[in-house]
Image (cartoon, coloured by chain):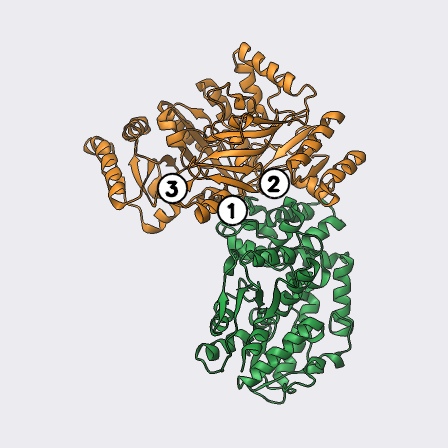
Amino acid sequence: MNDIVRSLAEIVGEQYVSDQNEEAFFYSRDPGLMPDHKPDCVVLPETTKEVQAIVSLANREKIPVVPMGAGLSLTGLAIPLKGGIVVDMKRMNKIISVNEKSRYALVEGGTSQGALKSYLIRHHPRLRHSLPDAPPAATIAANVMIHGQGRLSQQYGFNSDMINGFEVVLPSGELCPIGSAAMTSEWYSRGAPFPDLSGLFLGWFGSTGIITKLAVKLYPNKKLRDVEIFVIDNEETVPDVVFEITHTELAEDILIFTQPMPAVFKDNHHVSFYITGDTEEELEFKRKMIWRALDPFIKSKDGGFMSIPPGVKGSLTEMPQTSAARIADIKKGGGFEYSGPVVPVEWYPQCARKLSELAKKYNLAYSGMIRIVAGGHCMMYAFAFAFNRADVDMVERTKKALEEVSNFVLELGGMYWKPNVDEQNMAIERMHPNTRNLMKMIKSNLDPNGIMNPGNWEVL
Amino acid sequence: MNYEEIIHRCFRCGYCKLTGDYDDFNCPAYRKFAFDTYAPGGRMWLIRAWLNGEIQTSARFQEILFSCATCSNCVEHCVFPFSDDLVNIFIAAREEMVNTGILPPKVRDYFKNISTNGNPYKEPAARRGAWSEGTVVESYDGQEYLFYIGDVGSYDDRAKKIARAVGELLVKAGFSIGILAERENSDGNEVRALGERGLFEYLADMNIELFKNLGIKKIITLDPHAFNVFRNDYPSRGAEFEVFHYTQVLAPLLEAGTLPLKKFEANVTYHDPCYLGRHNDEYDAPRTILRAVEGLRIIEMHQSKENAFCCGGGGGNFFTDILGGGKDSPNRVRVRQALDTGAEVVAVACPQCAVMLDDAVKMANLDDQVEILDVGELILRALS
């Protein structure tokens, strides 16, 4: 490996490659619960050409390459399961351009969510992108690679739906533009009206290529934003409430949370919907329309609005919500992990019951965090458990609870979101054989040496 | 190790290494080295691994530990309840390392020089007050204020000019000040930050006793690092004096127009020293002073006040230079941020920041584009 490290140093500079124990320790794990696997080295490229050279070298030498953003998937997707080279992309963090009229931003593959948010506020205040509630250090490309969701997912789908193409380094080291950029210098379409090739890479967790440049769709950034919470004590009613809110086509975002603490939240399901407007009048119109849509639930005493103190409202309208990260401190132990299957909204009741059953069975602090996707076509239901990483028993109980979620989801027919390697293998097994074969064909043709993030989507 | 019980609570979410608006990475060590191991989260996870025996003491781990500039950006932006203790945790880990006796050579030499010479420059104590020769600044002899200079202002050639400027300015402003010259000792802020708890306590106790014996009740410091340690660490060891940074005593006078100033035409940006700003919440006094100068157009850097990017000199790095060298060294990055404002003058209120930024300007051959001036130097120029 020393020769490889020397070769990498020639590509990126000695300062930006490490085979030291400290980097091996840190990059062998993420904040979640997956077992650690040490990389042979970590490299920090600054340019696309450097990424190409790294991948070419790895392909020639048949060494695993694992692309990494902020390493925040929690499910170990950037853990080098078979060693090799971790390619930390965060030095490639330039916002290359923003096309205001066509509403997209072109960014490098290591650009963080927070950097784009801040840049747009400063330079293009009428535009925004679909910011997830992951910590702002999370990178845009990695989030797209895992089909992340964000603040605009209720309206426009997964964050991976909200892109206008990308540039990808193939396992051969060749650079390939995907979308309109394959034809022009403009980034206005991910694929249509031509074959949409983005699916060869999105959701593959870097096992078919590394995104070095990405066009992110931007959307109107309204001047005003507010949140309301509709509380229901019967999980069976939640899908109906979501159906009525989404029917209005007026909500920016719909999140549902259910948690036992503080006591006022216990046994309730909180459907928080966000509305935006450029004027108070617009905001008020949307608010009233949704109120009207939910009025029958109030009349039937199935639900009601919760008054939100200003401090709490501030926290709820924060983007990203810092409270999402703070869940990790509920047990004063720096840990939380969730299994977040993508399932139909109508499966909410089963998921809610399973969550409380598992929390009770394993004596864990829990939170259900649900985001409605694409007008209610599906939802991401996060079975989230906080744990103390210094408490071995609690860590084990959390792992077991999450394993049960995995099995439950499979039985239910749900699709794992950002599945860990075990869940990927379960999904591959369950998959229609022809679909599995199609994945095999794609993988074997794109990455015949199996160098890209091996261990993930091991269909071969 | 102190704080051992909370180290595992870090989620390594990364808020700590960013600015408050998430615009950019704002941890100087991370900015320089770019591996996550050098960010606060990485340092937390590695300290835990080191205490658990999962990694061993190594030159790399020492570099990671001692490259922290103690700038407190992580304290400002971490979203967890233990955020206030982040820098304290890193200092505690350094203390643990010091207790092993295995230290990076530059850190070891720093302690040795302080122990044997009373300063990190290996200069004789007799030269400590040499900067004041030819000025109106007198030795301390019962004046209302002790004007405390610190190691950098006393011995560094660039910083000595700042000491002269501020000393003369304070006298012109009518303050009754005196310096200790050869009687002055290191304040110990960097000794504490580098983890030599025993040496720090020795220095602090010696200073407190000296100040008490001389009847000193009020201190004006040139250096925010001294201001910080006098204000925050000495009281628990029995110190009872009032402490001011020099900008704090000058600001009200300049705001009231007491000092006649000439017009001074320049585009200026102000760099917040971490030990004045984030550590002690003093963002206004230097700006109040600058605003008092007619003709100065003050342009803020995007990374200012709570979000100021550290020059890289804090936490002992001024002396150990672990963060120095290359285009991504924090002082070079900070100068680029200053140039982005269009400023021709970068005003600072810390001799260590001034030297760090001056070095960066020279390294990047930017002398003809931007000048680093201490606020005191700038005001002295504007005095008619």
Badge 3 or badge 1: first in the primary sequence: 3
Query: Gap between marks 1 and 2, in whole Å?
Result: 34 Å
Q: Which mark is residue A332?
A: 1
The amino acid pointed to by label 2 is Met
Residue A61 shown left or right of residue B21 in the figure? right
Question: Which residue, given by chain and number where applicable, does mark 2 sit on?
Answer: A92
Q: Is residue B54 at all visible to an observer of this figure?
A: no
Query: Gap between marks 3 and 1, in whole Å?
Result: 37 Å
Question: Which residue, given by chain and number where applicable, does mark 3 sit on?
Answer: A221
C-beta proximity under 8 Å, tags 3 and 1: no
- Which residue lies at the image location 49% right of the left edge and 82% below the top edge? B259
In the image, residue A6 above or below residue A313:
above
In the image, residue B380 above or below residue A152:
below
Label 2 crowd (10 A; few <14 / some 14-19 / many >=20): many
Chain B, chosen colour in render: green
The image quarter in which residue B330 lies: bottom right
